[in-house]
Amino acid sequence: MTKHLILLALLASPAAAETFAIAPGPDAEAALQEALILAQPGDEVVLAPGRYDIVNQLSLANEDVTLRGAGMDASVLSFKGQTGGAEGLIVTANGAILKDFAVEDAKGDAIKAKGVDGIAMIRLRAEWTNGPDAANGAYGFYPVESRNVLLDGVVAIGASDAGIYVGQSQRIVVRNSRAEYNVAGLEIENCYYADVFDNLVTNNTGGLLVFDLPDLPQQKGHDIRVFHNRSLANNTPNFAPQGNIVGLVPAGTGMLIMANTDVEVFDNDFADNKTVNLIFGSYVKDFTDESYYPHPRRIHIHDNRFTGGGTDPDPGEFGSALRKALGVPVPDVVWDGVMPLSQWFTTGLAAGEGHLVANNSHATNPPYANADFVGFFGLPFLHSVKTDPAELSEPLAPLPPVQVVIRGRDVSHPGAWAEFAK
Amino acid sequence: MRLAAALLVLATPALAEVQPDAIAAPRPVRHLSDYGFFDDLAAGTPAPGVVPYVISAPLFTDYADKDRFLYTPAPVDPGTGGLLDLPVGSALIKTFRYDDHRVETRVLLHQASGWKAWPYVWNADGTDAELRLAGADMTIDTGHGPAAYHVPNANQCKACHIGADKQITPIGPKLRNLNTGDQLDRLAAAHVLTSVPADAPAVPDYTDTAVPLDVRARAWLDANCGHCHAPGHPADTSGLYLTWDEADPLRLGVMKRPVAAGRGSGNLEYDIVPGDPDASILLYRLTSTDPGVMMPELGRSMVPEEGAALIRDWIASLKE
């Protein structure tokens, strides 16, 4: 009956913004999904406080719709009994604003946004409530192939791949967020122009990841700024299902930068990541994609603070190699030293593709090592570790801030943001 | 005024004539009967101008039988193999049933602003079907065991029926899917097609064991996976493309690593390992019924046993 009333009301209504009020109860899932289908640009779908047991994937496909709850601990969409659909909530329309609710125990990814221009995820929680488990969904927050992406104040817990994952997207801000007990805490993969700041990543297998992978529609990730974050004690054993690239991340990794270009990492705190606080290097698995470039270029690491860590590298292949090549404690900043053999045998990194490591502070560990994994794994008699960061002295300038525009508003600007986030 | 018009449509009894206003209505009409697609809904007899058709390589949907009908206000140029260019005012009607038990009817309506997709669920008496925007869940004895049958909601329709331009699009009525038996001649005689092209391409019937194994497998993958796993389509984030015309073995999944599969990887390393179906993620996912693992993500709760056997044989036949 309610359903028909909603339908009739809409048939008769003018263009004024509508509010769809959803309350917990046996018909809540149908009412919520129907509201998400009927909502028009400017409309709001509002979740009353309470727990919602959802069995089918929810989806939002109309532009400029807001879905909001009463708080990430007050309005909870629980997918514990999910029987259909590969994620909790999927958004495929531009300009969506999601705020103040939680998605728990999705069978696949918790919240995915695919191919949209403008997506805001504000004060949301994505959690697998049983803690780290290979049977948990892959991603907590998963904007992919999107533009103008904002994540602010989200919390991700228990993802079997990445808690916060932005893939193949452009113009991204991730801030004020927390990722805990995921395999990867916060990952930016195959992306262009991202600002990642004021986040806390702790108790993950790996804290901060900036990756580029082959065989994907968008490659050659670049222009990523990671600043004023805390990456603390990411020492949870890797629980990713086999076959996933993230499975190669050693437990105890504070930050891993792989095969990306123009990454600036500054003013962060790294502490107590047992394998290594920060490592950057090349994609090491086999690939055939000719348009892919497996080596990092112009990685700029400066003015970070390092404490502890590197004391007990993960016993897997990577951690063991670090232990053997560098000893413990593993230095705070490690470059794998991998480059094309033509460069390795001759002059080293090509001009204009070098890195800069400078002005970091180190409480306990040696500051830097070039592990020279080309020599270590391939030509042991030529293996030579270098420990003076001055070898990486490419003159790199700071990268410009990223601008994110959602529904015509520059949400990367603090003034516009205050209004937007209310 | 709009309300009055809408109520008029809602109140109109079933008609034996297609209702262009219902096809064009910005909000979906409440009942399938409101469209006038059928002379006799209970018997499934189409109204004049509503033409039944079949496609050569259909999608698996929990062993449901599907009755397909097409309505076009004007005959269509058949083109050269791709999707029919159905004009505004056209409708595609697909009823899912198990023997005489009709479950749901999905309609695709071509409006001036683009295609719309709406699901209708049949009543217990089988006399009419009602709009169910949020979809529905039910248990059905399929004859192959019980299915936890899910009627997709209106958004989930778009999950598959979406073009590279992000607009809703039909999938099935491509000339190459319609070119089976004498169907093209029949569609021309029924004024759906303006003519029958001399050399129309044809997708083979993947159940026809006289067709080579790799051709059958590719036809099955195209029908069951290719609407998502194609450039510009929802699953392109994976870089795995399973369309009929994909020529790159890596893109098809051969020794390709998963990207965002999560536990969908089943602890396996590659999508397809030639000669080793049990080491291939592709087979693992299409034989799973776990919503976080299975492929396709929507449209089935059962394992497509025959299709899985075909893909198993095909992967086993591939040389390293």
Image (tube, rainbow, N blue to C red):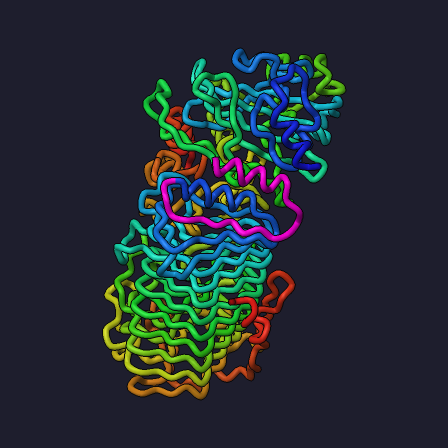
Q: Nearer the viewer, residue A187 or A18?
A: A18
Q: Nearer the viewer, residue B36 or A11?
A: A11
Judge whether residue A272 is colored magenta. no
Q: Nearer the viewer, residue B219 or A108?
A: A108
Residue A204 spot, x, y in % from top left:
32, 65
Judge whether residue A7 is colored magenta. yes
Q: In this image, A241 relative to B310: left or right?
A: left
Residue B286 spot, x, y in % from top left:
39, 35
Q: Residue at x 56, y 43 (%)?
A: A38
Q: Residue at x 45, y 27 (%)?
A: B60
Q: Is residue A312 above or below residue A317?
A: below
Q: Which residues are magenta?
A: A1-26
Residue A61 visible in the picture: yes
Q: Quadrant of residue A179?
A: bottom left
Residue B257 visible in the picture: no
Q: In this image, A385 relative to B152: left or right?
A: left
Total residue callouts? 0
Q: Residue at x 41, y 26 (%)?
A: B62
Residue A413 spot, x, y in % from top left:
58, 74
Q: Quadrant of residue B304?
A: top left
Q: Nearer the viewer, residue B285 or A353?
A: B285
Q: In this image, A201 relative to A172: left or right?
A: left
Q: Is residue A118 above or below residue A178?
A: above
Residue A340 spot, x, y in % from top left:
49, 67
Q: Is residue A121 above or below residue A40?
A: below
Q: Residue at x 37, y 26 (%)?
A: B305
